[in-house]
Amino acid sequence: MNDFKLNTDLDLEIADGDFVTGDATSEHQELLIYSAKGDWKENPTVGVGAAGYLKDEDVNGLLGEIKKEFERDGMNVRIVELTDEKILVDASY
């Protein structure tokens, strides 16, 4: 999905004095995974809140919540799994 791009600090990326746009699917996925419900004032039910799942060691719950939130955001989710302590995602708009 084309949108404003974010830099590694999750701030708007700016080049030549202007906002950078392009495929921002990975940024959307990252924000959904990191955000907890209530973090977004305009849509307080959005977000996975991954940190909470990791404290509980509920891997299946985390993967299920990621899939649910991605689908709710309009993505076609093909794979969400944990491999080598990394979350592997194959999902796109």
Image: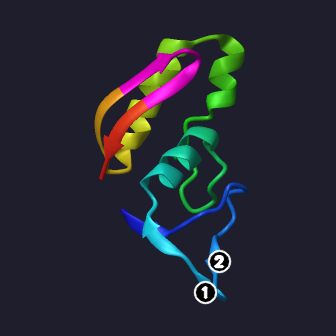
Instruction: Give amino acid for label 2.
Output: Ile
Instruction: Write down the residue under mark 2.
Output: 14
Toward the viewer: 54 or 26? Answer: 26
Give the answer, above or below, for where 83 lies relative to 51: above
Counting from the top left corner in percent of width and height, residue 29 is at 49, 46
Toward the viewer: 28 or 8? Answer: 8
Give the answer, above or below, for where 34 lies relative to 50: below
Helix, strand or loop at disc 1?
A: strand
Counting from the top left corner in percent of width and height, residue 20 is at 54, 76
Give the answer, above or below, for where 48 lies relative to 53: below
Residue at point 66%, 19% (across, down): 54
Is 37 on the left-hand or right-hand side of 79?
Answer: right
Magenta residues, as a range?
80-88
The answer to whether residue 47 of the structure is visible from this angle is yes
Asked if disc 1 and disc 2 are in contact, CB closer than 8 Å, the reply is: yes
Is 53 on the left-hand or right-hand side of 82?
Answer: right
Counting from the top left corner in percent of width and height, residue 8 is at 68, 55
Helix, strand or loop at disc 2?
A: strand
Is 65 on the left-hand or right-hand side of 53?
Answer: left
Residue at point 64%, 87% (across, down): 16
The answer to whether residue 36 of the structure is visible from this angle is no
Residue at point 65%, 77% (across, down): 14
Give the answer, above or below, for where 55 lies relative to 90: above
Instruction: Write down the residue under mark 1.
Output: 18
The overriding secondary structure of the stretch rendered in magenta is: strand
| Quarter that holds the N terminus | bottom left
Magenta run includes residue 87: yes
Instruction: Give amino acid for label 1.
Output: Asp
